[in-house]
Image (cartoon, rainbow, N blue to C red):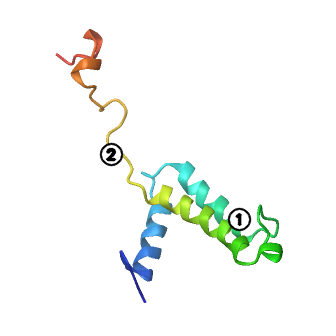
Amino acid sequence: MKARGGGVVQRLSRLASLLASPRKPKLPKLAILAAVAYALWPLDAIPEALFGVFGLLDDAVVLWLSLGWLFRPTPTASPTEIVLPPSRRTDSDDPN
């Protein structure tokens, strides 16, 4: 079974490596755990027992949004390495 951006196994492997990566912020990782807990928790904003497929849809959307946040590229520059555009620089920002 092939997914759009690679196989399911490759995506799960990438997910595991992102969750284990020290370079990724902790908040998106916690969002994944919270989304999984929300999907497994019997109390939902839209209960499956009352709304059927729509009840599952809210779980899927929460999980999808948290995965999108985790898979978003992380900036490689630290805040001290970010260079301000010339219009926003002050004399104290000039490295020369």
Question: Which of the labelled discs sits on residue 25, or is there none?
Answer: none
Q: Residue 35, image x and y in percent?
A: 65, 62
23 to the left or right of 50: left
Callout in the foreground (1, 2): 1
For the residues labelled 1 and 2, the Cα–Cα distance comes to: 30 Å
Above or below — where is 3 with respect to 84?
below
**Judging from the image, what secondary structure is the residue with disc 1 in?**
helix
Rendered residue at 39%/50% (across/down): 74
Residue 7's place in the image compared with 87, above or below, is below
Three-letter amino acid code of the residue under disc 1: Ala
Is 51 located above or below residue 21 in the figure? below
Q: Which residue is mark 1?
A: 37
| Residue 54 place in picture, x, y as percent | 70, 72
| In the image: residue 52, left or right of residue 32 | right
User: Tag 2, which secondary structure?
Assistant: loop
The amino acid on which the numbered mark 2 sits, given as a three-letter code, is Thr
In this view, the residue farthest toward the bottom is 1
Q: Residue at x 52, y 62 (%)?
A: 67
Instruction: Indicate which disc, 1 or 2, sits on the residue closer to the N terminus.
Output: 1
Residue 72 % position (x, y): 42, 55
- Residue at the location (22% across, 21% down)? 86
Q: Which quadrant is the N terminus positioned in?
A: bottom left
Task: State which quarter of the image contains the C terminus.
Answer: top left
Do labels 1 and 2 touch, CB within 8 Å? no
Apparent side of residue 74 relative to residue 67 in the rendered image (left or right)? left
Q: Is residue 57 left or right of residue 29?
A: right
**Toward which corner of the image does residue 44 lie, by quadrant?**
bottom right
Q: What residue is drawn where x is 37% and y is 32%?
A: 79
Q: Is residue 92 above or below residue 69?
A: above
Quarter-of-image position of residue 45: bottom right
Residue for badge 2:
76
